[in-house]
């Protein structure tokens, strides 16, 4: 045995003295340490498990049979105080007969938690549905099957093999029906059979419009008259984007009759007979198909009161599935307004003639706003704090998946709002009838709470995947938040949505301090105050999200959509690709937002748009250093309305700068949530630069390829290949890029690219492509980037001059001017004579005709100009008189402009609208008088304005071609042919 080491002992007197000194000097403190929390694990088996027993010990060997008993055991454990409780759900389906409602009584004290989680290696499912089996062929001719499911319930959804099945439907052409205040008239004789259908009150009418998607149930069908249930029909024909006056052509459908069941994948439930009908999809075997029939409207209700909130709860690695939402089937219908919000109940301010007088808004409609309702969610959280959802899946749910801090009407506990410190991370939301996550309420207490505890605050939504959802309620966003203080939506993946990807704010600016002039005019403030304090919406971070393929069905939406003021809020480094409309949409009243370093690829509309019309206070927006393949930006002008706009770049997918490539790669879920490598978002970026980018035929340029590793790990096996068009040459100069690059590092290589000795057109553009290959993130990658190198044939028959940097080219009868320039015009706004020109000296005498065809114009501005010019001295910018030009523009027709006072500036104008290039233009001089003409065919000429006198005109003048981009420091290319002076 090894002897124990000896310990030196301090004398007792010395030890006592040291302790006394330490206590007197404060060097030694004696804290009263609280005891460490105890812990308890409760295990629950799935429904029907053989060894499960609610009277058992709740351990692995004797798991409980129900979540309800687990809840009772949790409460008993919490009564002991100072304890962490974990409820482990074993693998399988845990079917609920009623929602699990967790209140303050189910919540531990500070420093402890109750965690509802999957057992190790388990994938438990919490379901509100029952499986349907026992299918039999009902009609061999149509291929419809049936199963007995019992009575006493209804559903709006059915899930087959994990997908939301389509309720039996009948599509209506717009001409089939004529709307009226009570419903509609059937115009198509082929629809006469509808009057004989049973269960008419269960038939629904759906209207998919611009930004609203509406449902209303039928009351009766008699002959050709369809009467709708109220107040659903009144509410759906009231306001904006209404059934009878949509903002775009609507799509109309009748739903939910056995007679409509004629397409594969459709279903119908006969609630009287208790029989479910379904027509299988091709290849679907009803003997093995997984059919889930929802019986509950919600699964989990987390919420207490403001005095005793639910708190310190965790939900991890669970799947929530199998619900419906029945409200749209009631006489209230779904009078959708926007983003899961709808009008509910009889509206007291609705005038009797509202079907006509309120089809596009009215004062009475404004009186409805403060009573709008929110869609209920399958999982609900309100009056709660320190709640976390991690690694969960929300799928096959009949409404919104997760509601956080919604209004009281959307929470089954009757207490809304008041959500604090709620996080949602690493979770998946897909294949639901409604949207993914809705945060906040829309009624007055949401934005100006009567109790400070109602404020929703400190909400975090990160590393989630929300895709292919909102399949029935098409108006709902993937992620939406109305009124929240300190909200973070970061590094989520949002994809394949009918409407907006990420929506922020509500109220259209009407609830912000000072109100909205637009809503003053509409009459809203006859029903609510003009607030003088801010709303609860502030400090929002929308950062690093990957949003793709949104606005696929609805309209008036974007990748990211905002409403109303939200001070100190940022939208940074998000990647938006494939929007069916807009990238950033700053709708009414959006203010105090900044957006930087975002990337927008393939947006059908503008990358950024602000609705600043009709007195909206939209403004105070900062857009800096964003990248977009669509150059469009509207309603946001630098220096106006407090806006700052600078450094934003128009790019192509082949010319993405390194910074844009970094944003693309880093967008979306991070770390373990990132998923498999995405070939469209490689971990390496590459960019090309040419010096010079424009050269003469036969000259060379240096093309540099720069490669950067964005991956957190080292990348290797780098190789670069450069290709050029036929006739061009490329050879590497110096060393290639390094074989490997550490995270965040770059390297480059240079190639000498040489243009052909001559080119057949004035300007020849060569696409120089670099393909970069290698390995990163444990996978191979390949990306291609390119740039255009331009070769110019030199001028041979004319001279060139630019009052701003310009370049010129000629081939045969064709000419090109590449130039910029603020304008060639003088008025109260300034004096500008900035252009590029090719010309001939002293070629135009007292009688002369100068003609040319304008063949092409870059649309640098609607007032960019290209055409023919007469001037005493074309090189005498801002001084030479005798100045006239006949020009085409991209957006404002053709213009005859002249210098009326001889001061060297064009200051007078006549025009003809509706004319664009290609177009012939002509100036005709007779003595000191000049006229302007245009022609679309080169033979028939139309005079523009009157003949004018040019003061100071010389006996002989220069004549030529002139162009300006009408955009300072923005270069455009302008093409001409067949220039002549006669």
Image (tube, rainbow, N blue to C red):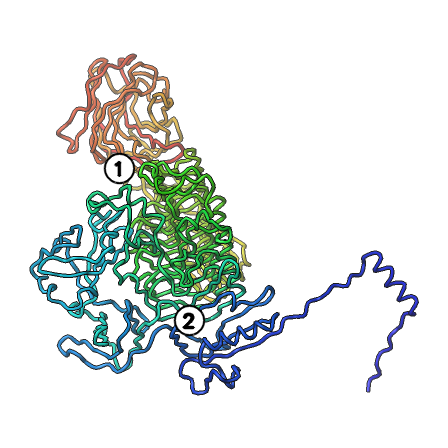
Kind of element beneath mark 1: strand
Q: Quadrant of residue 299?
A: bottom left
Which of the pair 895/29 is nearer the observer?
29
Q: Position of residue 488 (x, y in %)?
A: 48, 54
Residue 856 is labelled as 1
Image-based side of 120 in relation to 784, left or right: right
Sequence-wise, the earlier of marks 1 and 2 is 2
Which quadrant does the N terminus fall into? bottom right
Rendered location of residue 980, percent (x, y): 22, 27
Question: Would you call the spot at circle 2 few (<14 residues within 10 Å), some (14-19), or many (20 or more)?
Answer: many
User: Which residue is nearer to you in this view: 418 or 776?
Assistant: 418
Residue 319, numbered label: 2
- Residue 839, percent from left and from top: 30, 25
Which residue is nearer to you in this view: 929 or 297? 297
User: For the residue labelled by badge 2, is the local secondary structure a helix, a strand or a loop?
Assistant: strand
Q: Is residue 362 above or below residue 83?
A: above
> In the rendered image of this protein, does residue 307 appear above or below residue 245?
below
Relative to 492, residue 240 above or below: above
Q: Residue at x 68, y 67 (%)?
A: 34
Q: Residue at x 80, y 61 (%)?
A: 28
Position of the C terminus by quadrant: top left
């Amino acid at each position: 045995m090894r002897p124990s080491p000896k310990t030196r002992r301090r004398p007792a007197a010395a030890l006592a003295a040291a302790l006394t000194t330490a206590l007197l000097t404060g060097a030694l403190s004696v804290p009263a340490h609280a005891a460490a929390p105890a812990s308890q694990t409760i295990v629950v088996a799935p429904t029907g498990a053989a060894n499960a027993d609610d009277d058992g010990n709740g351990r692995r060997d004797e798991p409980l049979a129900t979540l309800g008993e687990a809840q009772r055991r949790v409460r008993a454990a919490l009564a002991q105080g100072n304890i962490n409780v974990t409820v482990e759900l074993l693998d399988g389906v845990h079917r609920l007969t009623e929602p699990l409602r967790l209140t303050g009584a189910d919540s531990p004290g500070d420093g402890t938690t109750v965690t509802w989680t999957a057992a190790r290696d388990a994938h438990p499912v919490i379901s509100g549905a029952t499986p349907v089996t026992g299918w039999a062929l009902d009609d061999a001719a149509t291929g419809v099957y049936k199963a007995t499911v019992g009575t006493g319930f209804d559903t709006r959804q059915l899930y087959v093999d994990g997908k939301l099945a389509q309720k039996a439907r009948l599509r209506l052409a717009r001409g089939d029906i004529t709307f009226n205040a009570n419903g509609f008239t059937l115009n198509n004789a082929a629809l006469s059979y509808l009057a004989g259908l049973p269960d008419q009150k269960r038939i629904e009418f759906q209207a998919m419009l611009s930004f609203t998607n509406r449902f209303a149930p039928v009351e009766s069908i008699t002959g050709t008259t369809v009467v709708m249930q109220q107040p659903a029909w009144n509410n759906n024909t009231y306001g904006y984007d209404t059934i009878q006056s949509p903002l775009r052509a609507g799509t109309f459908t009748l739903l939910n009759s056995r007679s409509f069941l004629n397409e594969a994948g459709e279903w119908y439930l006969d609630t009287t007979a208790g029989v479910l009908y379904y027509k299988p999809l091709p290849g679907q075997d009803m003997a093995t198909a997984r059919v889930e029939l929802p019986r509950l409207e919600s699964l989990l209700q987390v919420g207490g009161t403001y005095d005793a909130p639910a708190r310190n709860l965790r939900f991890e690695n669970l799947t929530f599935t199998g619900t419906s939402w029945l409200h749209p089937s009631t006489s209230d219908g779904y009078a959708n307004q926007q983003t899961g919000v709808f009008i509910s109940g009889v509206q007291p301010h609705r005038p009797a003639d509202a079907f006509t007088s309120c089809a596009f808004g009215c004062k009475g409609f404004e009186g409805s706003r403060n009573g709008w309702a929110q869609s209920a969610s399958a999982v609900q959280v309100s009056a709660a704090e320190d709640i976390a959802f991690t690694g969960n899946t929300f799928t096959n749910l009949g409404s919104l998946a997760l509601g956080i801090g919604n209004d009281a009407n959307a929470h089954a506990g009757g207490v809304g709002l008041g959500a604090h410190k709620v996080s949602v991370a690493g979770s998946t939301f897909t294949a639901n009838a409604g949207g993914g996550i809705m945060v906040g309420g829309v009624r007055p207490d949401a934005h100006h709470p009567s109790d400070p505890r109602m404020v929703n605050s400190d909400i975090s939504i990160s590393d989630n995947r929300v895709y292919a959802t909102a399949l029935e309620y098409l108006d709902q966003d993937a992620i939406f938040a109305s009124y929240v203080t300190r909200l973070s939506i970061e590094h989520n993946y949002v994809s394949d949505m009918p409407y907006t990807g990420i929506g922020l704010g509500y109220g259209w600016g009407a609830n912000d301090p000072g109100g909205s002039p637009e809503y003053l005019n509409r009459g809203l403030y006859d029903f609510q105050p003009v607030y003088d304090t801010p709303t609860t919406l502030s400090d929002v971070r929308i950062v690093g999200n990957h949003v793709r393929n949104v606005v696929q069905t609805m309209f008036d939406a974007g990748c990211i959509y905002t409403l109303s003021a939200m001070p100190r809020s940022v939208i940074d480094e998000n990647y938006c690709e494939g929007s069916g409309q807009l990238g950033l949409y700053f709708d009414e009243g959006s203010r105090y937002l900044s957006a930087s370093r975002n990337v927008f690829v393939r947006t059908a509309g503008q990358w950024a748009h602000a609705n600043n019309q009709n007195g909206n206070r939209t403004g105070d927006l900062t857009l800096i250093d964003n990248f977009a393949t669509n150059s469009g930006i509207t309603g946001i002008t630098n220096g106006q309305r407090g806006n700052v706009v600078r450094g934003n770049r128009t790019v192509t997918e082949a010319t993405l700068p390194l910074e844009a490539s970094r944003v693309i790669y880093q967008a979306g879920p991070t770390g373990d949530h990132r998923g498999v490598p995405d070939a469209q978002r490689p971990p390496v970026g590459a960019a090309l630069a040419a010096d010079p980018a424009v050269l003469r035929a036969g000259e060379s340029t240096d093309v540099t390829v720069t490669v950067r590793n964005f991956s957190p790990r080292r990348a290797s096996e780098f190789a670069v290949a450069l290709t050029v068009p036929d006739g061009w040459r490329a050879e590497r100069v110096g060393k290639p890029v390094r074989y490997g690059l550490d995270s965040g590092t770059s390297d480059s290589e240079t190639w000498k690219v040489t243009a052909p000795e001559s080119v057949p057109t004035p300007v020849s553009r060569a696409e120089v492509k670099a393909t970069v290959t290698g390995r990163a993130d444990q996978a191979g990658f390949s990306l291609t980037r390119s740039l255009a190198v331009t070769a110019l044939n030199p001028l041979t028959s004319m001279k060139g001059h630019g009052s701003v940097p310009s370049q010129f080219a000629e081939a045969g009868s064709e000419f090109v001017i590449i130039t910029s320039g603020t304008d060639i015009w003088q008025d109260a706004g300034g004096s500008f004579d900035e252009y590029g020109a090719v010309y001939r000296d002293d070629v135009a005498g007292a009688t002369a005709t100068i003609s040319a065809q304008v063949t092409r114009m870059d649309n640098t501005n609607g007032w960019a100009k290209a055409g023919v010019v007469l001037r005493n001295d074309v090189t005498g910018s801002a001084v030479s008189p005798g100045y006239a030009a006949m020009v085409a523009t991209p957006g404002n027709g053709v213009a005859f402009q002249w210098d009326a006072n001889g001061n060297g500036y064009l200051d007078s104008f006549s025009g003809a609208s509706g004319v664009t290039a290609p177009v012939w233009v002509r100036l005709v001089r007779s003595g000191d008088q000049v006229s302007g003409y245009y022609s679309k065919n080169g033979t028939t000429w139309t005079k523009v304005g009157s003949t004018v006198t040019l003061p100071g005109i010389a006996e002989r003048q220069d004549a030529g071609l002139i162009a300006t981009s009408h955009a300072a420091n923005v270069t455009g290319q302008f093409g001409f042919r067949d220039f002549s002076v006669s």
